Amino acid sequence: MALPVTTTAVYAALLAILFLALCIRVMLERRRAYVPLGEGTSETLKRRIRAQANFAEYAPIALVLMALLELQGAGSFMLNAVGLPLLVGRLAHALGIGQMPEDRRLRSIGMGLTVLAIVLAIIALLAIALFG
């Protein structure tokens, strides 16, 4: 019988809230800058679009890896070791890139934490698959 995917579900829900916030920021800036399609000439809109897109590029694969870990029986320590840096990283990156002027430190920390989360998940999955 498969284990319920509960820890991953909590992180997925929290990340979905962040994603919706990023979407709303894009929509509001589109309205403010009168840009219905594309990015126009608004630097703020460009940054907000990239913050949203970057999130959409990285968060799903990390959540899939987390769900696989949880389904393989990984404990809460491992799941939180992946989930916490992922959540903090995505938030830091969004805050760093999504503002003018950009906070490169937050952006870099965010990407570093996101990559760390993905690498930890990969290592843990391979360890479980190869060594039980």
Image: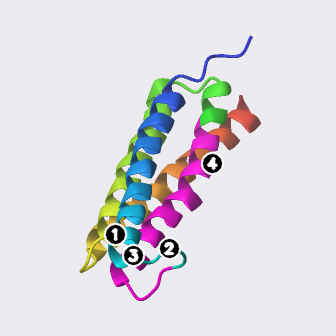
Front: mark 3 or 2:
2
| Residue displayed at 36% across by 84% down | 43
Tell me the distance, in whole angstroms, between the alpha carbons under discs 3 and 1: 9 Å
Q: Answer left or right for 38 relative to 125.
A: left
User: Would you say residue 114 sits in the magenta stretch?
Assistant: no
**Residue name at image x 46 percent, y 70 percent:** 49
Identify the residue under disc 3.
45
Judge the density around disc 3: few (<14), some (14-19), many (≥20) Cα neighbours within 10 Å: many
Q: Quadrant of residue 130?
A: top right
The three-letter amino acid code for the residue at tag 2 is Pro
How far across and down, in percent of the image, does residue 23 sit? 44, 57
Q: Secondary structure at mark 1?
A: loop
Q: Nearer the N terminus, badge 2 or badge 4? A: 2
Q: Which residue is mark 1?
A: 98
Residue under label 4: 122
Image location of residue 44, percent across then percent down: 33, 78
Q: Are marks 3 and 2 in contact (CB under 8 Å)?
A: no
Q: Amino acid at mark 4?
A: Ile
Q: Nearer the viewer, mark 3 or mark 1?
A: 3
Number of the label disc, if any, that sits on residue 36: 2
Looking at the rendering, the stretch of residues picked out in magenta corresponds to 39-66
Sooner in the amino-acid sequence: mark 3 or mark 2: 2
Which numbered disc, 4 or 3, marks the residue that appears first in the sequence? 3
Judge whether 59 appears above or below 47 on screen.
above
What is the secondary structure assignment of the residue under circle 4? helix
Q: Quadrant of the N terminus?
A: top right
